[in-house]
Amino acid sequence: VRQTTQAVARQVGLDGEGCGWPGLGKAAALKYEVFAEVLPEDKPRLVQAFRQTGHVVGSTGEKNGDEAAITQANLGVALPGATDVVKTTASLLLTHPGLANIVAAVSASRRIFQRFVAFTFARAINAITIAAFLGIGFILSGQLIVTPLLLAILVLANEKVAWAITSDRPSVSARPEHWSVDALVLAILSI
């Protein structure tokens, strides 16, 4: 079982040392990356031990009893033959056999996150630009200048930014990212 576990781990990019779980204490377990022979009731404790030390944890499973570890992990993955309980608790459901699809799914989700950030940033900048454009026109003329030509220019400028976002090539971060509203607001205000 341990050799099989180590071989599967290598396929998804985990080259660290592996061990069998039975009889291994939590503190000693943290020096390993791959575990075999872990009982369902031990999985949540193992996940908690890694999360408490700041690690990003993924947990996979397909049988009832795996859902506790899947729920507590940063990324819970249900395998293709998973029970309904496991499927509903997982944040990712694999539809094809093998664990290698996890890497592709994580990369795709990180690209999507980058696009969300870029879209939010662009829309905020557009809103500020339109308000400034209309405000300056009002200050200079004393009235709100809204002509069909001006509206057409504003719509086209907004759509050009939206087109650019759909064709960008976002980078995939090495670690999970989180929304930082403060950083986003500071970046928008610095422009």
Image (cartoon, helix red, strand yellow):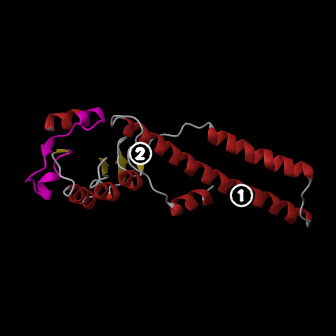
Q: Position of residue 190 (x, y in %)?
A: 60, 58
Label drawn at residue 93:
2
**Image height check: is 117 above or below 181?**
above
Q: Position of residue 148 (x, y in %)?
A: 91, 51
Quadrant of image for the N terminus: top left
Q: Residues within 10 Å of mark 2 (few under 14, many from 20)?
A: many
Q: Position of residue 128 (x, y in %)?
A: 71, 59
Relative horizontal placement of residue 35, taking residue 146 as reference (left or right): left
In the image, farthest residue toward the left: 23
The disc, 2 or 1, on the residue closer to the chain's N-terminal end is 2
Residue at (28, 58) in percent of width and height: 51
Q: Is residue 85 on the magenta stretch?
A: no
Q: Is residue 10 on the magenta stretch?
A: yes
Asked if disc 2 and disc 1 are in contact, CB closer than 8 Å, the reply is no
Q: Amino acid at mark 1?
A: Ala
Label drawn at residue 127:
1
Label drawn at residue 47:
none
Front: mark 2 or 1: 2
Q: Residues within 10 Å of mark 1 (few under 14, many from 20)?
A: few
Label 2 and label 1: CA atoms lie apart by 37 Å
Q: Give the image quarter of residue 10.
A: top left
State which region is magenta: 8-34
Residue at (55, 51) in percent of width and height: 117
Give the camera-side residue of 84 and 150.
Answer: 84
Q: Amino acid at mark 2?
A: Leu
Give the camera-side residue of 128 and 80.
Answer: 80
Residue at (13, 57) in percent of width and height: 27
Relative horizontal placement of residue 49, taking residue 128 as reference (left or right): left
**Image height check: is 186 above or below 174?**
below
Image mark count: 2
Quadrant of image for the C terminus: bottom right
Q: Give the image quarter of residue 138.
A: bottom right
